[in-house]
Image (cartoon, rainbow, N blue to C red):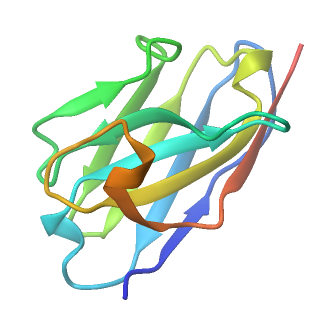
Amino acid sequence: QAQLVESGGGLVQAGGSLRLSCAASGRTFSSYGMGWFRQAPGKEREFVAGISWNGGRTSYADSVKGRFTISRDNAKNTVYLQMNSLKPEDTANYYCARARRPSTSSYLDEYDFWGQGTQVTVSS
């Protein structure tokens, strides 16, 4: 059973940066794609970024392209989300998730393990 623990969230001013981390337990971390999602109050959970098992493929929501970068370190069982040029509309609880397959996906039901989330608040 995989466990995912996010960290790195916090309060930042618009235009600032944050780096989220997601530490995964389990020996098979490197066999699966990983993703970051976010959920703002009153809104549905939405895809932010995804990365394939070896980092060879990445995908991003249009709203974060050019500002966010997803990466992974399989030796450390960790996936990262570097967030630059943050905007107030990026405020949400951010979740990492493990995909059911080695590839990346933007669909929630393609992910089977989820972390508890880390809050990101961007002030204007």
Q: Is residue 15 left or right of residue 20?
A: right
Q: Which residue is drawn at 53% across and 42% down?
A: 37
Q: Which residue is drawn at 33% across and 39% down?
A: 50
Q: Which residue lies furthest to the right in this view?
A: 124
Q: Nearer the viewer, residue 108 or 74?
A: 108
Q: Which residue is drawn at 75% across and 33% down?
A: 43
Expressed as whole percent of the image width and height from the top left, the position of residue 7 reads: 62, 59
Q: Residue at x 15, y 54 (%)?
A: 53
In this rendering, the answer to whether 81 lies above or below 87 is below
Question: Quick check: can you spot residue 80?
Answer: no
Question: Quick check: can you spot residue 117?
Answer: yes
Q: Which of 105 and 91 is in front in this view?
A: 105
Q: Is residue 25 left or right of residue 37?
A: left
Q: In this view, does 13 lie to the left or right of 101?
A: right
Tag count: 0
Expressed as whole percent of the image width and height from the top left, the position of residue 68 reads: 46, 24
In this rendering, the answer to whether 3 lies above or below 111 is below
Q: In which quarter of the image is residue 56?
A: top left
Q: In which quarter of the image is the C terminus?
A: top right
Q: Which of 49 and 78 is in front in this view?
A: 49
Q: In which quarter of the image is the N terminus?
A: bottom left
Expressed as whole percent of the image width and height from the top left, the position of residue 69 reads: 39, 29
Q: In this view, does 53 lie to the left or right of 11?
A: left
Q: Nearer the viewer, residue 101 or 33?
A: 101
Q: Which residue lies furthest to the bottom in this view?
A: 1
In this rendering, the answer to whether 51 lies above or below 32 is above
